[in-house]
Amino acid sequence: MDNIIEINNLSKKFKELTAVDDISFNVKKGEIFAFLGPNGAGKTTTIKMLTTLTSPTSGTILINGYNPAKQQEEARASFGIVFQDPSLDDDLTAYENMDFHGMLYKVGSKDREERIERLLVFVELWDRRNDLVKHFSGGMKRRLEIARGFLHHPKILFLDEPTIGLDPQTRNHIWTYLKKMNKEESTTVFLTTHYMEEADKVSDRIAIIDHGKIVARGTSAELKEQTKTNSLEEAFLSLTGSEIREETVKNQAMSGRARAWRR
Amino acid sequence: MIAIYTLWVREVKKYFRSKSRIIGSLGQPILFLVALGFGLGPTFKAAGQGDYIQFLVPGIISMSILFLAIFSGISVIWDRQFGFLKETLVAPVPRWQIMVGRTLGGATVAVLQGLIVFAISFLAGFRLANFATLPMAFVFMTFIALIFTALGTAIASVLEDMHGFQLIMNFLVMPIFFLSGALFPMTGLPKVLEIVVRFDPLAYGVDGLRGTLGGVSHFGLFADFWILSVVVVVFIGIGSYLFSKIRV
């Protein structure tokens, strides 16, 4: 098997809105794959379908050979994920956050211990392992989440805008960790980001989604050539236009709240 | 099963870590014990009903378990808001195990709180009627704790945020407490109230505790035990179902 992720004719419809519209693409084993698009283009919805959090309206997905809609546990064991928003338990220490994650993912206690130490050292948080996460800065939390994402030896690591709101130093570190882990453990990395120069630097291949459809695929060089531009940012703008998008994510959250009230 | 254990440890650890929560949630039961116990005590006695503290303590223990259990269950909403919920929802374990782990953890914490209130009640003059039934009293406390942690989880699973919280406190938790017979005897009630009380699961918990700690029960310990066992299973079932349907 050459492709670790296979997506065929995948669609997701909410009541009036088609968030993801008949997309197909593959991600190769061991590559760093950037999934780019403006706000509300369908990136997060796609990641949710890939990671079993929501089921597709139609189309098929294979994650490490498993269908996330049907073989949820097998699919879940195959990936790690760093969400767009924080997902740590602030009232636990860094070590406990790692330890509980390892237990949930059934990492044996000896392996867990060694791996937690290695990863916390790797993201430079070993000295702070016994501090409560609520005292951590945004960058430290992000690093901890990345370490946690790698803990259970996932085949794929999903990262939804991992560097958003971080200073250039931290961002630089995060990409260094990701590239290193990608090399050392040949973990496939699937990421979204709005920083085009970062996507350009780290990714092997790129797919651009807009209005729920894939508008371009290929290496950064191929995209630049296709659009006759000099940077990925220009290529991105030429493919997706320069008009500002509505954040449909917010609209969804609002309607979700309205739903909760009606119950 | 390790998932259940993990979530259980998390709840218990967090409880012991927040001393303010332990002490804070003792305030209300102590206030009830002192204000009602000593305030209404003489009237209760004059009405020929005996010692009010003896009568009240099982109700106050039930109350403290009820509140803490509901809060533990509802903490799913906080986890949703602070993001930790997602981490558990993508873990490769069945959702019901996550729910059961959380519920066992929340219930453990609530029972511990009930035991602390129980210990304090001796300072207010409570005397145990029968030592032999003490283990049975523990079982009833566990039932109350499980039922209401599961209920809290079920409610939190369908709410998106804390806006509905006042609604739940005033229209669910408070009625459950006040209509359970925790504060008043269940004999000679107006017909309507008597029927309502029979639909309140906490009534059987209070009654079971009253029977095992004070030696007097209204419905009978056997009835209390079986009704509560069924309610535990049903509520954990409903809670697991709703929890497994959570979308983030």
Image (tube, rainbow, N blue to C red):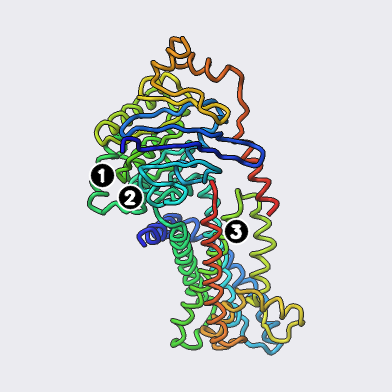
Q: Mark 3 points at which residue?
A: B155
Q: Name the residue under label 2.
A: A102
| Closer to us: B79 or B216 | B79
What is the CA distance from the residue labelled 2 to the residue labelled 1? Answer: 9 Å
Considering the numbered disc 3 on the image, is that residue within a helix, a strand or a loop? helix
Tell me the amino acid under the disc marked 3. Ile
Tag 2 and tag 1, C-beta contact below 8 Å: yes
Q: Do labels 2 and 1 share a chain?
A: yes
* Residue B34 in picture, x, y percent from top left: 60, 72
In this view, B78 is above or below B47? above
In this view, B9 is above or below A137? below
| Closer to us: A195 or B199 | A195
Query: At 65% across and 80% down in the image, what residue appears?
Result: B41
Query: At 58% across and 88% down in the image, what residue appears?
Result: B220
Left or right of A240 in this view: A95: left
Q: Of the numbered discs in the image, which one, if any, rests on residue A115?
A: 1
* Residue B139 in picture, x, y percent from top left: 47, 78
Q: Can residue B58 be seen in this view?
A: no
Indicate the quadrant where residue A167 lies: top left
| Closer to us: A69 or A54 | A69
* Residue B6 in picture, x, y percent from top left: 38, 57
Considering the numbered disc 2 on the image, is that residue within a helix, a strand or a loop? helix
Tag 3 and tag 2, C-beta contact below 8 Å: no
Left or right of A39 in this view: B88: left
| Closer to us: A83 or B148 | A83
Task: Bin the neighbour count of mark 1 within 10 Å (Cα to Cα): few under 14, some 14-19, many 20 and up.
Answer: many
Which chain does tag 1 point to?
Answer: A
Tell me the amino acid under the disc marked 2. Gly
Quarter of the image with the N terminus of chain B in it: bottom left
Tell me the amino acid under the disc marked 1. Arg
Query: At 40% across and 48% down in the image, what residue appears?
Result: A76
What is the CA distance from the residue labelled 3 to the residue labelled 1? Answer: 38 Å
